[in-house]
Amino acid sequence: MKTISACTMDCPDACSLVVTEKTDGSVSLRGNPDHPFTAGFACKKIRNHIRRLRSPDRILHPLLRRGEQWQRISWDEALDLCAQKIQALRHEPAAILHFHSDGAKGVLKQAVNLFFACIGASRIRGTLCDGAGYIACVQDFGSRENNTPEDLLNAGRIVNWGKDLSRSSVHLAAIVRRARKRGTKVLTISPGGYGNGSFSDDRVRLRPGTDRMLAAAVIRRMLSRNEIAPDIFARTRNPDTFRAMLRRQSEARLLAACDLPEADIETVRRYYEADVPVATLVGAGLQRYCHGGENVRFINALALLAGHMGRTGGGSYFHLHSMGNFDLSWAGDLKEKPRRSFREPTIGRDLLAAGPPEVRMIWVNGSNFINQAPDCHQNIRAFERIGFRVVTDAFMTDTARRADLVLPSALMLEQADIVGSFLHRHVQYAPAVLPPPGEARDDFQIISELGRRLDPPVLLPDADACFRMSLDTPQLNTTPEELRARGSVRANLPDIAYAGMRFDHPDGRARLPTVLHPEPGPPEGYPLRFLTLVRRDAIHSQMLPDPYPRLPEAWVAPECRALTGLDLSQPIFIVSPLGRLKVSLQLLPGLHPGTVVYRRGDWMSRGGGANQLIAARRTDMGGGAAFYDQYVRLENG
Ligand SMILES: Nc1nc2c(c(=O)[nH]1)N[C@H]1C(S)=C(S)[C@@H](COP(=O)(O)OP(=O)(O)OC[C@H]3O[C@@H](n4cnc5c(=O)[nH]c(N)nc54)[C@H](O)[C@@H]3O)O[C@H]1N2
Ligand SMILES: Nc1nc2c(c(=O)[nH]1)N[C@H]1C(S)=C(S)[C@@H](COP(=O)(O)OP(=O)(O)OC[C@H]3O[C@@H](n4cnc5c(=O)[nH]c(N)nc54)[C@H](O)[C@@H]3O)O[C@H]1N2
Ligand SMILES: [Mo]
């Protein structure tokens, strides 16, 4: 039997999937050939997913902590216990914290937020993902819009600032591959060494964190050559301050900060000066720094001043808001009832420093934040101080194993929902195709049932009402019935964002950045930047490698100076002021020599967990986590 569903992973591609169930009980998944964006293929994560659903490690029943042991309890007991704990704090709801992330995406997951908004619980704000880049774009253009990804086929050239096309988005990669076949030249700008070779005609390998300096140096040179048309400056509100700021910079100093030879400025300038449209891709990696938002703002400024915004084949592409096409106001906070919030990137520190009321209950869904947010050990200390910890998950993650009550969650394909994408414009219905194992339930069921047990109850809208309210937007203008029948609806938005360089600020003009911060150098004793990048075959900390490696791997350039004096036949540790992690060290030609690469998402309980070494710091804007700001050293023994 074949059913069409959709991928709800926290991944830009949000694929339409054909699920085939055979009579022998086996299930296969593949990209839907009839979906205009998915076009018949999906990634390895999809192939791994069925194995994950059927894993013997799935949590099958509610589990209550009894000292060091887990006791199996019934759903009734579990929900009554939760209701009783919430009831006891109902007069002081800020003592309850709701922590969620995007374990599975979907409109119904918002109902969990609605539940906690209704009782007035504390919430989280900020993000571990893309907040700095997102807000940078909003500051520049007044909103966050892209040309359609398909419009990349009209680009004469593409400049890829640090998007890992070989791993993070197979469909974006396929579009770039097609564009290259048609003759589009691609320049990749990154710290190097990660396999974008087959997506690049030219490469610039810069020091991590310094993209804004490179973009500024290129703009400066364009200015001195009178290459920026006055009518483009007229589309910005603050050209004079911007030019004055750039004049104060020295090109030599900018280049030294990026660790680049002079010829590279010319390479980038020539790409942008082309009389064909130039599209700019902006990866999420370069915004995971203290000045990450500024990095994105200078890249946007370059795309704009070189005349490539608001036109076909041009534009600057950063993540969209994956829920941006939905109306989620039904699940939002009420203005008249502001809630206490804790910042996600610094969650452990903020919880430990919090004033009254002390957080006495936490509810976690769709998140493995103990492992995924910076400074794990601080996160653990903060988490363990909370009196009653509920985690809804399908596996005993580093977060779940520290809970008091673990509720078994359904996973993708076992729960119905509606998803959007942070790359394309299709909104899709993802029906439940397989039964959840054991007693696992989806978050919506769990939270709706819990609400009914409170006194007074919190009665959530039913699933269909949530879908209906969410889909009722000018760009979607559809109903649950229509979406179910069609599987997918494309949001009706212009193909070209900011056409004619009309931006979404009230005056229609873009804003240019006015400050250029230097990039902090390595602190004494920690010379290497620690880049914790995505894994190809996994989404975040879901799907552990199989077979599981004896030690986590890390990579440095063969010419990395830290190799002198290291005995590679002995254990190697990555060391930061926060701790040390034993790794198997490999050489990666092409990587910037001041860098250690680690593939993030492996678990602390399995000997991994890069965030044990990463201090909790926020980005300059958007409340993001500056993961890649961390410096480390390597040592034996
Ligand atoms: N397979 C897989 N795909 C995923 C995910 C996953 O877990 N697995 N996660 C999804 C999510 S939520 C996200 S946010 C995205 C993230 O996707 P990406 O944007 O690709 O994010 P990262 O892997 O964090 O960083 C990507 C690249 O940034 C480069 N980089 C690092 N620092 C700098 C810098 O200072 N300048 C420049 N120019 N480049 C730099 C690195 O070389 C790296 O290759 O991927 C999504 N797709
Ligand atoms: N060092 C470092 N750390 C990073 C980053 C980095 O660059 N460097 N980048 C980060 C980025 S881009 C992101 S987006 C975050 C992601 O951080 P998280 O969202 O915390 O990561 P996941 O591993 O996806 O954790 C989701 C959990 O939800 C569970 N789950 C799946 N489906 C469901 C469901 O339907 N219901 C419930 N209740 N649970 C479900 C999964 O089993 C999993 O344990 O990590 C960030 N962490
Ligand atoms: Mo992310």
Image (cartoon, rainbow, N blue to C red):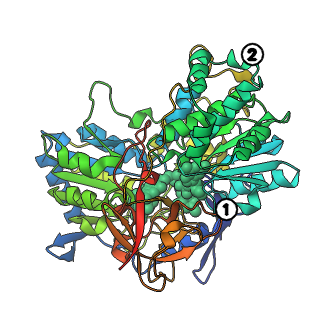
Q: Quadrant of the C terminus?
A: bottom left
| Cβ atoms under marks 2 and 1 closer than 8 Å | no
Query: Residue 594's spot in the image, x, y percent?
Result: 52, 59
Q: Quadrant of residue 122?
A: top left
Q: Quadrant of the N terminus?
A: bottom right
Residue at point 76%, 44% (across, down): 267
Alpha-carbon distance for marks 2 and 1? 38 Å
- Answer with left or right where residue 566 lies relative to residue 456: right
Query: Looking at this rendering, what residue extends furthest in the right direction?
Result: 182
| In-front residue for pair 431/567 | 567
Q: Earlier in the sequence, mark 2 or mark 1?
A: 1
Q: Which residue is mark 1?
A: 166
Query: x and y percent of residue 536 in the render?
Result: 59, 66
Q: Amino acid at mark 1?
A: Ser
Q: Determine if residue 115 is in view.
A: yes
Q: Nearer the viewer, mark 2 or mark 1?
A: 2
Which image quadrant is residue 248 in? top right
**Residue annotated with mark 2:** 231
Asked if ligand 1 lies within 8 A of label 2, the reply is no
Q: Residue at x 70, y 36 (%)?
A: 147
Question: In front: 513, or 608?
Answer: 513
Tag 2: amino acid: Asp
Q: Is residue 497 visible?
A: no
Q: Position of residue 299 (x, y in %)?
A: 62, 37
Mark 1: secondary structure: loop
Q: Position of residue 322 (x, y in %)?
A: 54, 44
Q: Nearer the viewer, residue 113 or 528?
A: 528
Q: Secondary structure at mark 2?
A: helix
Q: Is mark 1 within 8 Å of ligand 1?
A: no
